[in-house]
Image (cartoon, rainbow, N blue to C red):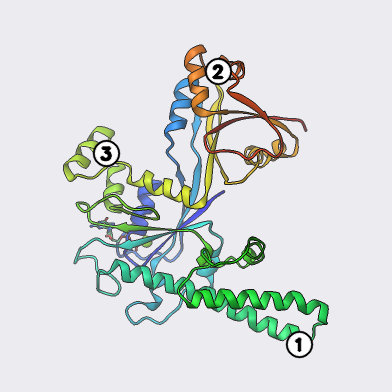
Amino acid sequence: MTAIGLIGFERSGKTTLFNALTGAGRATGFTTHVDPHEGVVPAADARLVKLSTLYQPRKTTPAVLNLTDFPGAGFAGALGGRSEPPSTKLLGQLSQLDALIHVVRAFDNDAIPHPAERIDPDGDIETMQLELTFADLALIEKRLQRLAEETKSMKAAERVAADREVDLLRRLQAHLGDGGTLLDAPISEPERADIRHYRFLTERPMLTVFNVDEDAVTDGASERIALSARLEEELRDFDEDEATAYRAELGVGAGAVEMALQETFRLLGLRTFFTVGPDECRAWTVRGGDTAPQAAGKIHTDLERGFIRAEVVRWDDLLVCGAAVGASGAEAEARKRALSRTEGKDYEVQDGDVLHILFNV
Ligand SMILES: Nc1nc2c(ncn2[C@@H]2O[C@H](COP(=O)(O)OP(=O)(O)O)[C@@H](O)[C@H]2O)c(=O)[nH]1
Ligand SMILES: [Mg+2]
């Protein structure tokens, strides 16, 4: 399951956004929580809604992301004169995530003081980047020291691999020192695979969310979006008409939360595929490059083990066929019109595929 973490300084609005995304209704404001909150975010998907309208299944299940809301205090290290770095425990938890969402305080409200008593989104972004970079540099430093010890007693043959690792880590160190991240480090694919087990923090894709005043929402650019977490949390309790009217009054477009999710999907290179039928229509996610058996494995391990082949049709082609002959004949109609294909073990699943897995265990 894809795991995302909300990070940011105290009172930047992480828990508010967590509530907006999950509906968890956790306390916000000065109630600093010590433990992270865990939640599940259903990914709204218009394609799934349309497939469900065709199939009228007993159950419709969206794809979900696991979301963790971290307490802000852990990140206050470089701010406001506090000198504590993030704890080892926090760094360990962060390193397990697939992606990070950095919530940046951009709303103005004297009643809610910023830990550093200033509203400076760009400064906060820089500080957070530094905290993550320092954590990675510390890890590299520790590993280099270990390697220096170990290589002393190594035979020449062993030393080749160790020297190669030292060289790679030194290059990463230099890149971080120049203000880069490990996500954009100029290293080869095999080298990237070699460092994966370190689970460096700046190697995680990160979405920056500017948490702005309710009346200041504008469209964001890629990898940075602006939304009002408080507004989005409040609007959860409105019915659709009320929400639309309220958004119109404030001049705020719909779908800020959906946009945040879509952007997260894009950053992670996630692809959505669907399974359909009278029992359930469901959306699933795989990583870009995952094959049909890997997708099958998301549904059930038996389907991956016993994978024979997949019938594949694009979601919109299936809808067209369904509209012509009804849901029960849609897949047969797609085959007849040569819109569905039979794919084998090497097929790379595409975003928007409807899969029907044939298997044998
Ligand atoms: N005006 C305004 N206040 C917000 C917004 N988002 C959060 N807040 C307020 O900021 C305070 C801190 O929010 P919280 O979510 O607890 O921050 P956290 O410490 O990062 O988890 C709360 O009083 C929220 O109501 C926003 O978009 N606009
Ligand atoms: Mg919080």
The residues bearing labels 3 and 2 have C-alpha atoms spaced at a distance of 37 Å
* Amino acid type assigned to the residue bearing label 2 in the image: Ala
Horizontally, residue 298 falls left or right of residue 9, namely right
Query: Dot 1 corresponds to which residue?
Result: 152
* Viewer-side label of 3, 1: 1
The residues bearing labels 3 and 1 have C-alpha atoms spaced at a distance of 67 Å
Query: Dot 3 corresponds to which residue?
Result: 238
Residue 321, position as x, y percentages in the image: 52, 18
Q: Mark 1–mark 2 contact, CB under 8 Å?
A: no
Which mark sits nearer the N-terminus, 3 or 1? 1
| Outermost residue, top side | 325
Q: Quadrant of residue 159?
A: bottom right
The residues bearing labels 1 and 2 have C-alpha atoms spaced at a distance of 68 Å
For image coordinates 33% across by 46% down, the residue present is: 256
Q: Regarding mark 2 in the picture, which secondary structure is present there? A: helix
The C terminus is located in which quarter?
A: top right
* Amino acid type assigned to the residue bearing label 3 in the image: Phe
For image coordinates 39% across by 49% down, the residue present is: 260
* Amino acid type assigned to the residue bearing label 1 in the image: Lys
Q: Which mark is residue 330?
A: 2
Residue 146 position (above or below residue 207): below
